[in-house]
Image (cartoon, rainbow, N blue to C red):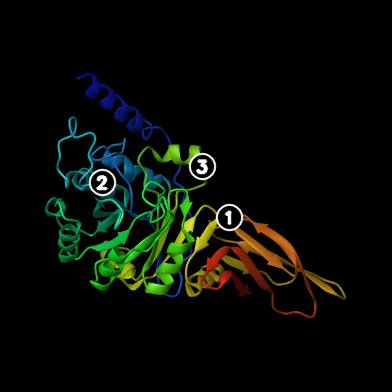
């Protein structure tokens, strides 16, 4: 009884924090290429596995952080609170649905299939029923998820507890790839970025995923790593809906947003940069130079190099830059936008 009382008290304290006045961070990310840019987090936990919050708290955290969609992905095999919280794998989604509908958050049903390496941990989202996925053999579990039309991705491939000898692609992952079971890789998990996983996504045509993997409150992530926002996947969807996100994930239209870095294919990053930045007409000229205003309309940081000079343009800010009167175009290197070709270069 004492353990139950402590757990309930902790839940009440977390819930009470949302009764106070809070401002929603819109996290402005521009739409690109006739697609809607949606901010998503497809990996998080609640008390129904090894998390410490109630399911609707995850929805409220996402709302205040400016996200569009989340998936609660509690473990099917690992439930340390099962003495206090009944085991019903579909229950977290059911408990969060009402809050998601009220706050306009797209809630995607999901679960984490938790196994040793290989193949490691994998998330299945857009599932229809979690309970049949709770099987002993991981191939059976993944095939059940596949038969439900799930999008399946490999979580934290470089997690040190499972990758003690370094990040590695195993034969088992090749089998999953060839069987059409694995569709993406989490190249960013919490505070960890795996460049090798980014290369695998490019090489094997897998979707780029970036998630928080939250267990405690989102505030604990901000305090521990001193970050402005959680890592997330930006999905370029044809419509703002669960079906729109699913189609975009299977099509591979995503980038990873991690701290102040944005990582993905050049075609998407270039569009994001061009839609975010505005170079206004010259407001002053002399015989050799012109002075123009560079404006950042987005929530991204831009670490730029122009004519050998380093610049930092913060979210929603502007600066005056100087260019040669002979150059009508301005070519910038964006050092924190990472593509298959290295840092991004754009001409404004």
Expressed as whole percent of the image width and height from the top left, the position of residue 155 reads 34, 55
- Of 348 and 249, the residue lying toward us: 249
Where does the N terminus fall, quadrant-wise? top left
Q: Is residue 179 left or right of residue 65?
A: left
- Judging by the rendered image, the residue that carries numbered circle 2 is 74
SS for callout 2: loop
Q: What label does residue 37 carry, if any?
A: none
Residue found at x 24% / y 54%: 110
Dot placed on the residue nearer the N-terminal end, 3 or 1: 3
Expressed as whole percent of the image width and height from the top left, the position of residue 24 reads 44, 46
Expressed as whole percent of the image width and height from the top left, the position of residue 274 reads 56, 71
Residue found at x 33% / y 69%: 248
Label 1 to label 2, Cα distance in Å?
33 Å
- Residue projecting furthest to the right: 287
Q: Is residue 23 left or right of residue 205?
A: right
User: Counting other residues with Cα less than 10 Å from the Cα at mark 2, is it few (<14), some (14-19), or many (20 or more)?
Assistant: many
- Judging by the rendered image, the residue that carries numbered circle 3 is 225
SS for callout 3: helix
Label 2 to label 3, Cα distance in Å?
23 Å
SS for callout 1: loop
């Amino acid at each position: 009884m004492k353990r139950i009382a402590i757990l309930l008290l902790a839940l009440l304290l977390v819930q009470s924090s949302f009764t106070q006045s809070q401002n929603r961070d819109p996290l402005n990310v521009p739409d690109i290429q006739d697609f809607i840019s949606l901010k998503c987090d497809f990996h998080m936990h609640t008390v129904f596995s090894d998390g410490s919050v109630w399911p609707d708290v995850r929805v409220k955290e996402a709302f205040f952080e400016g996200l569009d969609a989340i998936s609660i992905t509690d473990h099917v095999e690992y439930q340390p609170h099962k003495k206090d919280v009944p085991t019903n794998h579909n229950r977290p989604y059911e408990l969060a649905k009402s809050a998601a509908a009220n706050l306009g958050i797209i809630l995607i049903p999901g679960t984490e299939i938790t196994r040793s390496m290989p193949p490691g941990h994998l998330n299945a989202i857009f599932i229809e029923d979690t309970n049949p996925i709770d099987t002993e053999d991981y191939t059976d579990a993944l095939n059940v998820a596949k038969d439900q039309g799930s999008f399946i991705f490999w979580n934290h491939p470089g997690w040190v507890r499972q990758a003690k000898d370094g990040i590695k692609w195993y034969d088992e992952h090749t089998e999953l790839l060839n069987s059409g079971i694995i569709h993406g890789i989490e190249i960013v998990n919490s505070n960890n970025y795996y460049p090798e996983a980014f290369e695998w996504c490019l090489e094997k045509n897998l979707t780029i995923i970036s998630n928080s993997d939250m267990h405690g409150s989102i505030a604990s992530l901000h305090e521990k790593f001193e970050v402005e926002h959680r890592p997330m996947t930006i999905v370029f969807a044809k419509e703002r809906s669960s079906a729109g996100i699913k189609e975009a994930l299977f099509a591979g239209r995503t980038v990873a947003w991690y701290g102040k870095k944005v990582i993905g294919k050049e075609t998407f990053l270039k569009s994001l940069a061009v839609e975010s930045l505005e170079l206004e007409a010259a407001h002053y000229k002399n015989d050799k130079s012109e002075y123009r205003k560079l404006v950042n309309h987005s929530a991204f940081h831009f670490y730029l190099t122009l004519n050998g000079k380093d610049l930092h343009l913060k979210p929603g800010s502007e600066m005056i830059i100087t260019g040669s009167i002979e150059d009508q175009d301005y070519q910038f290197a964006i050092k924190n936008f990472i593509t298959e070709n290295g840092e991004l270069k754009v001409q404004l």
